[in-house]
Image: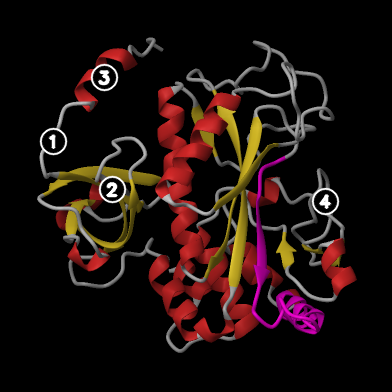
Amino acid sequence: MTDIVSNPAVLARYLALPQGSKVLAEYIWIDGTNNLRSKCRTLDTKPTSVEELPEWNFDGSSTEQAPGHDSDIYIRPCAFYPDPFRLGDNIIVLAECYNSDGTPNAFNHRYECAKLMEAHKDEQIWFGIEQEYTLFDQYNNVYGWPKGGFPAPQGPYYCGVGTGKVNCRDVVEAHYKACLYAGIKISGINAEVMPSQWEFQVGPCTGITMGDELTIARYLLHRVAEDFNIKISFHPKPLAGDWNGAGCHTNVSTEKMRIPGGMKYIEEAIEKLSKRHSEHVAVYGEDNDLRLTGKHETASIAAFSAGVANRGCSIRIPRSVNKDGFGYFEDRRPASNIDPYLVTGIMAETILGPVDGVDIVKRVQK
């Protein structure tokens, strides 16, 4: 592979040029492979609401979202954020994908998730997602690992400090600041169990905003990593062998769970989840069977389990929650490559009840 030539000092001269009253809007969407795509357009003025942003379109045959003979996919803005790369009044626009006949694209899982969240808005359901990811260099080697070899076994890397224990902290710190600038509710970061594996947490977010903010946080991570010539992997088992996989542990609570006596509602939710284990696993990420083996702090994909402070269970009740008698629970089954709208959607569907015309699992199976 040819080395990529980049000159940040020269680029900075151009980025500093005035752009008048124009605003650059980077439209972001999820494609047919659960990856992110984006393209930019110029607006005449800075929008004050999402309704002011124009609908746009792209070639869906190039993103595995449409056939070549009917390739136009429309993108409709649903949220926007300050752009930490272009700065000024420039924005990042999160958009949903729609077919030419006006129906939501098959990979637009936000559409039905939003229906569920709106129907159950009085429950004030909160989510917090812990996004694990792995860093690779441009030659597809785990970043910082010995060429053709392996580092020392897992042990000193989790929340590690110091050379030889953590790699590429600059990407992580830059991403943290980019999220804060964009107004994302990023609540923390830490090095993970496998070397060159990190985690950031987003939340608590109410309802549909959880999927929105995690999607933008992922986009920001990819964009930051570009500047360091680093590849980001969300694969749940990026390396075979005695190494931890990568998950998207999902913390959940309703208003009733967060007040004294809430343990009753937490236990009721866990009971409902136990009866839909296979349905949840079906939308909890590709190749998750490689991760949910019952080893490396995971439960087996074959069976549902729950426990207090037990990271080898499907559902973990934090010890502090068990002690206080209210709070939240953690679903440890979701893989790092989840579509967050599927996970939060089916969670609301299971613990709060179905909504007419909405079936998360059936939609994915089409």
Horizontal side of residue 257 vs 294, given as left or right: left
Distance of label 4 from label 1 (alpha carbons): 55 Å
> For mark 2, what is the residue?
91
Q: CA distance from mark 2 to mark 1?
A: 14 Å
User: Which amino acid, by three-letter code, is at mark 4?
Assistant: Gly
Magenta span contains residue 263: yes
Q: Which numbered marker is on residue 294?
A: 4
Dot 3 lies on which element? helix
Residue designated by label 3: 11
Q: Secondary structure at mark 4?
A: loop
Q: Earlier in the sequence, mark 2 or mark 1?
A: 1
Distance (Cα) linking label 2 and label 4:
43 Å
Between 17 and 40, the one nearer to me in the picture:
17
Q: Earlier in the sequence, mark 2 or mark 4?
A: 2
Q: Which residues are magenta?
A: 245-273
Q: Nearer the viewer, residue 134 or 329?
A: 329
Query: Circle 1: is it few (<14), some (14-19), or many (20+) Cα within 10 Å?
Result: few
Specify the label residue 74 is tagged with. none
Between disc 3 and disc 4, whose residue precedes?
Answer: 3
Q: Which element carries disc 1, helix, strand or loop? A: loop
The crowding category of the residue bearing disc 2, from other C-alpha atoms within 10 Å (few below 14, some 14 to 19, many at least 20), is many
Name the amino acid, label 1.
Gln
Residue beneath disc 1: 19
Quadrant of the drawing holding the N terminus: top left
Residue 182 in the image: above or below residue 153: below
